[in-house]
Amino acid sequence: MKFTHTLKFQIGIALLALIALFSFFSMHTLKILDEQRTQGALLRLAGELQATAQHMAMQAMNYEKNTPQDSAAYTRDLRLYYQDLMNITGQFDDICAAFSSGDFQRQLEIHEPMNPVLSENTLDAAYELEDYWKKFMLDLDKVMGPDKMPHLADAAKLIVDRNPELLQKTRNLLKALDEDIQQRTRETNIIIRASFAVALIIAIGIMLWFYRQVLRPLSGSAEGFRQASAGNFSYRMPVTANNEIGFLALSFNQLSSRLNSLFKLTARLQEGSDLNETLEFVSHTFPELLPLDWVGVLFVSTDGQIQLERAYSDGVPEELGILHFPLKDTLLEQCLNSGEPLHIPDIQEVAQLSSSYRFLQVLTDRQRRDAIFLPVTSQSPIPGVLVFATRQAHAYGQEHTQLLSNLATVITLSFSRTLKLAEHARLAAIGQFVSDIAHEIRTPLATVSMALDYFENTELPEAAHKRLLLAEQEMARINRLLADILLYARPLTLKTESTDLCLILEKAITSRKP
């Protein structure tokens, strides 16, 4: 699975997108707040220009109405009106220059330079106001004359005459600035709405992706586990994504398939009544659970050897003849003694370790490289070993050994049951054979008995008569033996009847007397 297909990566990307979106909105909000603060400051400065121009006009009008009549009053006006006029014009000049240059740091008393971008209309109004203000100051300087004895009355008259146009210029600047701010506000609103729409689309897309890639597959997984918990191991989850949930669904399907195969295997093993049929079923079914292309079963004989009874190669019976192997000092003996599955990871290499490993040499000759021995000892009339082998070297892992360990009881009981059924069938066949023989023997015995009956009514010498009685006794004994044999072969039926226990006890006591 590629890292880009994992939920870890995809959810990380989604979270990064949300974080980036949140950061963008946060930065954009801060920018809007800064712009609003800047716009408010610019409006305040433009308002100060207008207020300064109005204040300058009011001072000039008051001075015209109260023109000083003597030198003392004039000196006082120099100290008050002239100084105030210089301060006002200096303030107006600073603000006007700030609008023209775009540098409002000193006027707003901030530590970082504030250079707001003004529109062309605002800049044109600011340049027009600055040009008019420069001409106004040149004319004012000419009218006032020297600094020591300025002509304040002429200056006041000039201010009163030129102030309406100056106020109009400041109003034009204020109006252009206000229109600029309103335009920026409209653009900001459009950007905010567009950003919100984009954020909403991205959020909805992430939610839809999360639903399709996470929630819906998880719902299917929950349904799969519910079906499995109810015992439906044939249910398969849909694998809709190439990520962790898809891998989970795929693993669940494999697990469910294996469990289904195991349950069918268990049921089929319980039904097996023939050794060859059971081994054939194992050879066809077990390749779904572990690597397998050869399976065989060996049983211990009474002479201390172990015999290969049946074998299947690639699902087809393999004719190997009767193969006997010494059991002592072999891995087969070790497996039987331990009662646990024994894994031989490299048959060819292990077979060279000892000359007693003749069975491993047989597997090596058949190009088998890896094998597991499974003991068949529990409740089995004949101890044996079930062998699983494959051509692939080191094909069996710990999970395969663990699987066979878990199935060992079922497989052992199945083979034990199969062997018991085979033994019962053998005994039943023997019983049937004996029954047939008994019936065949009774026919000539009846003829002999009739002949003896004939001689019994005939006068015979004493010696011949004794021999006739002896022959009749032997005939009766043979008939009793045949009756016992037929009774053994016949199905057992119970017949109840009343009897005298005292008589039975008396016979038993009498038979025990010396």
Image (cartoon, rainbow, N blue to C red):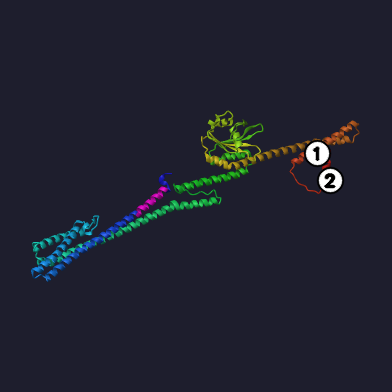
**Quarter of the rendering containing residue 452:** top right
Q: Is 12 part of what is drawn in magenta?
A: yes
Looking at the image, residue 327 sits to the left or right of residue 390; the answer is: right
Task: Answer with mark 2 or mark 1, whichever residue precedes in sequence.
Answer: 1
The residue positioned 74% from the left and 37% from the top of the image is 434
Extreme front residue here? 72
The image shows residue 179, relative to residue 394, as above or below, that is: below
In the picture, the disc for residue 480 is: 1
Looking at the image, residue 487 sits to the left or right of residue 177; the answer is: right
Where does residue 120 sit, x and y in percent of width and height?
21, 58
The residue carrying pointer 1 sits among few (fewer than 14), some (14 to 19) or many (20 or more) residues within 10 Å by Cα, namely: few
**Quarter of the rendering containing residue 425:** top right
The image shows residue 466, relative to residue 68, as above or below, that is: above
Q: In the rendered structure, which amino acid carries the disc numbered 2?
A: Leu
**Which mark lies nearer to you, 2 or 1?**
2
Question: Looking at the figure, which quarter contains the N terminus?
Answer: top left
Report whether residue 156 is seen: no
Looking at the rendering, the stretch of residues picked out in magenta corresponds to 8-22
**Quarter of the rendering containing residue 298:** top right
Separation of marks 2 and 1 at Cα, in angstroms: 23 Å
Report whether residue 261 is seen: yes
Q: In the rendered structure, which amino acid carries the disc numbered 1?
A: Arg
In the picture, the disc for residue 430 is: none
The image shows residue 457, relative to residue 504, as above or below, that is: above
The one of 174 and 368 positioned closer to us in this rendering: 174
Check disc 1 and report its element: helix, strand or loop.
helix
Which residue is disc 2 drawn over? 503
Where does residue 157 sit, x and y in percent of width and height?
11, 67
Looking at the image, residue 373 sits to the left or right of residue 477; the answer is: left
Check disc 2 and report its element: helix, strand or loop.
helix
Where does residue 271 sit, x and y in percent of width and height?
62, 44
